Structures are given as C-alpha cells and as structure tokens.
C-alpha cells in the first residue's frame, strides 16, 4: 500500500523560517532509515504558501489566487510517499519521526494513495494501458 505522509505547516514554516542544522540532520537520518527499510519512494519540503498559487474551478471558469493562504493548519509544509504493508505500519513509522516543527506542536497526516484496483470496472483496459505508459515515461525522466 502506498501512502502520502503530509507534514502540516506551522506559522514558522509559513513565514519561511528554515529548519535548523540539527533538525535537518535528524530528518536526514530518519530518511536514511526509511530508505534502508525500503519504504521511501519520495519526499520533500515545500516553500511557504506566499510563493504559491491556487486555481479555483467553477464550471469552465478558472480563477488564480496567489498566496499566502490564511489557514496555516490546513497547509502542507512537506511530504513523504511511502510503500508499506498497512496503515498501522505507516503510523508506527510516523511515530518515530523527529518533530518537524521543534518548539511547537506539529501534525503529520497519513493518507492512502489510490491504486488501480480501487477503481473497479471504471478503470478500463484502455485506461490501465494509458496509466502504465505514463508511469514508464515518468521512470525514464
């Protein structure tokens, strides 16, 4: 099972406060553990929402909204993509994570990623073939 592990933003992360060397070392060590365990697929930190944008869809209309965005607790500061056996295993790994926002409360969300088998008959052989082509092209990059 694949999961996205989402590190929620904090006022500091939204202000662009960069992690300390101590935190980067702790996270680097943690990411090495994940890699050695064979579960880490991808990970990265995100810049503050003030450097981003949102596109709102309303029928055929598209509206661009530049950051920053007000609700810090709803924003993302970073993520991992993991492949583990279960949600319980993902929870156990998250519990081992260094606090991503030292000196304050932090929250990490665990969300399963859809697999082809989750879509049933709607995921036709043609769509499955297209998905496989896209994934192969992504691997070549």
Image (cartoon, helix red, strand yellow):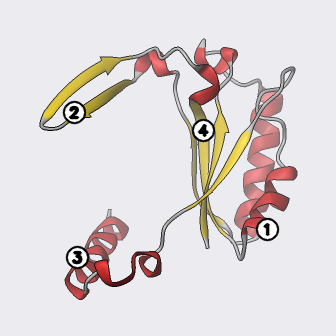
Compared across the picture, whether 85 is left or right of 57 comes to right
Callouts 4 and 1 close, C-beta under 8 Å: no
Q: From mark 2 to mark 1, how far is it between C-alphas?
A: 39 Å
Q: Secondary structure at mark 1?
A: helix
- The residue that appears at 66% across and 39% down in the rendered structure is 7
Residue labelled with disc 4: 78
Residue at the extreme front: 59
- The residue that appears at 29% across and 74% down in the rendered structure is 131
Residue labelled with disc 3: 130
How many numbered marks does the figure carry?
4
**Image height of 77 relative to 70, above or below:** below
Compared across the picture, whether 59 is left or right of 30 comes to left
**Image height of 111 relative to 130, above or below:** above
Viewer-proximal residue, 93 or 27? Answer: 93
Q: From mark 4 to mark 2, how far is it between C-alphas?
A: 28 Å
Compared across the picture, whether 9 is left or right of 67 comes to right
**Image height of 109 relative to 90, above or below:** above
How crowded pointer 1 is (Cα within 10 Å; few <14, some 14-19, many 20+) is rated as few
How crowded pointer 3 is (Cα within 10 Å; few <14, some 14-19, many 20+) is rated as few
Q: Position of residue 14 (x, y in %)?
A: 59, 17
Which circle, 4 or 2, is nearer the viewer? 2
How crowded pointer 4 is (Cα within 10 Å; few <14, some 14-19, many 20+) is rated as some
Q: Secondary structure at mark 4?
A: strand
Residue at the extreme left: 60
Identify the mark nearer the N-term, 2 or 1.
2
Residue labelled with disc 2: 58
Q: Secondary structure at mark 3?
A: helix
Which circle, 2 or 3, is nearer the viewer? 2
Q: Quadrant of residue 107?
A: top right
Residue labelled with disc 1: 89
């Amino acid at each position: 099972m694949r999961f996205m592990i989402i590190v929620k933003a904090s006022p500091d992360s939204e202000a662009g406060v960069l992690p300390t060397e101590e935190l980067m070392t702790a996270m680097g060590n943690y990411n090495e553990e994940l890699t050695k365990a064979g579960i880490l697929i991808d990970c990265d930190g995100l810049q503050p929402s003030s450097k981003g944008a949102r596109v709102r869809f309303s029928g055929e209309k598209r509206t661009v909204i530049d950051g920053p965005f007000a609700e810090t607790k709803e924003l993302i500061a970073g993520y991992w993509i993991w492949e583990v056996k279960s949600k319980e295993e993902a929870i156990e790994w998250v519990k081992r994570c260094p606090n991503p926002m030292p000196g304050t409360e932090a929250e990490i969300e665990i969300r399963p990623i859809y697999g082809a088998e989750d879509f049933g008959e709607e995921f036709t052989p043609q769509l499955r073939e297209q998905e496989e082509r896209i994934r192969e092209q992504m691997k070549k990059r």
